[in-house]
Structure formats: C-alpha cells, structure tokens
Amino acid sequence: MAGVEGRVALITGASQGIGRACALVLAGAGAKVALCARNREKLEQLAEEIIKQGGEAAAFKIDVGSEDEIKTGTKAVIGHFGRIDILVNNAGVARDQLVMRMKRPDWDEVLNTNLTGPFLLTQAVIGSMLKQRWGRIINITSIFGQIGQAGQANYASSKAGLIGLTMAVAREVASRNITVNAVAPGWIETAMTSVLPAELKDTMRKSIPLGRVGSGLDVAHAVKFLASEEAGYITGEVLKVNGGILMG
C-alpha cells in the first residue's frame, strides 16, 4: 500500500483551517477520514463535501479539552471504521496575554487543549496501532514552540511541550512500526490570523524569505507525506513549514 490510500485518519480540529485542509488532502489521497471537532454541523458539511468528491468521511464530535469526549469519540471512530491508522493532533486554542497579566484559567485552557488533549488522544488510539503494528501520529505544533513569542507564554509552552511529547512517544513505539512526528507551521492564513491588522500582516509577510503567507494546504501536504508509507523511516522529527523564517 503506497501513500495513505485505504488508511483511516482521525483529524482533530477538522471543522476549519489547517484541520479542514488536512481532511480534504488525506481524503483526496484515498484515506478514510474521521472528522473531529466541537462543531458537528461544520463537520457534517465537510463530510458531505468529501463524500460528493468520491471520498469516505464521517463526523464525530470531540472536544479535545474533555477526557470523556476523547475516550467516547475515539471508541466511536474505531466502531465505525474498525481501526485508526493515522492520528493528526491539530486542534488548538490561543489565549494571548503578557505573562504578568495572564490569568491562570487562560494558562490552563491552552495547556489542556494544546498539550494534554494530544497526550490523551495518543493514549486512546495507540492500542489500535500497536495491535496492527502500524501507525502514524502527527502533531501540529508551531514555530512559536521553537522560538517563543511575546504575549504567548501559554501557547508557546504548549507547543514546545508537544514537540517533547512527539519525541518521547516516537522512542516508545518505534519498534512497533509506529512513527510520531510534528509539523511546525509558521505564518499561515487561517480564520485566527485573518482578523489581525493589515499592517501586522504586511510586516510578517516581509519577514518571510519565500515572500508569502502560507496556506492550510501547505501544512496539509506535509502531513500527508508524514502519514504515508514513503515516510516510514522518519520519526521524532519536527518538519518546519514556515517559508524560511526559521532555518536549521
């Protein structure tokens, strides 16, 4: 089996942005996609779109901030598709504030969603992967987990922690033919970034060596590669998708 054809992929945060792009790209390459997020209506619309294009998809409501929803949701995915081959931990939130003003609830929410959620999802799907001795776990981190960002102590910490989780789990499961990698996007045009001031957007664009802001598809194609058979000898890596802002 080449690429991702016939594989079952669970994608969190699939209702919009990078997660939606990942779902469309993986489905277009022949994967069966379990679409997971909090907004069931958007998920069902996306599933319908994928099915109309000849793909296979189903919607599952999972709030990655809820351990109970993670457990019941992953069981529902396995019940529907029979297994999970690929996990894309994409769902995330930001609650920006200078560290001296950051409230504990804003810290807790971001760490719980962006780091604890992927940990719990990994635990929930790993049994299926171990049983079949094949799996791909791909964590969507961020350039700010590598270089930091003022006003994002919570977000940067969660994404740096996700890189550490990626490497630790990669070592634990490598002998079972399961790879664990991360994708670290830079400046990507999403609903979250679209509301930023035009001046800030222009400044950021000028700082990118490739001269353009990235798209969800740029990230999704990297995810598809890491999920494929062709990437079977890559694990514990952080693939930068940032237009050259951070090199080396």
Image (spheres, rainbow, N blue to C red):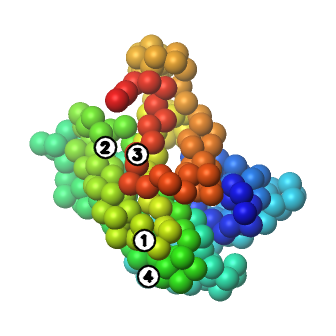
Q: Quadrant of residue 190?
A: top right
Q: Which of 190 and 235 is in front in this view?
A: 235
Secondary structure of the residue carrying numbered label 3: strand
Task: Check disc 4 and report the residue beneath it.
Answer: 68
| 3D distance between C-alphas at marks 1 and 4 | 30 Å
Task: Check disc 2 and report the residue beneath it.
Answer: 145
Task: Check disc 1 and report the residue beneath it.
Answer: 175
Which x, y percent locates residue 111? 29, 59
Question: Which residue sits at x=27%, y=35%?
Answer: 147
Q: Is residue 223 left or right of residue 140?
A: right
Q: Which of 247 and 142 is in front in this view?
A: 247
| 3D distance between C-alphas at marks 4 and 2 | 27 Å
Question: Which residue sits at x=29%, y=56%?
Answer: 164
**Label 4 vs label 3, nearer the camera:** 3
Looking at the image, is mark 4 or mark 3 earlier in the sequence? 4
**Label 2 vs label 1, nearer the camera:** 1
Q: In which quarter of the image is residue 246?
A: top left
| 3D distance between C-alphas at marks 4 and 3 | 29 Å
- Badge 3: few (under 14), some or many (20 or more) residues near its Cα, within 10 Å? many
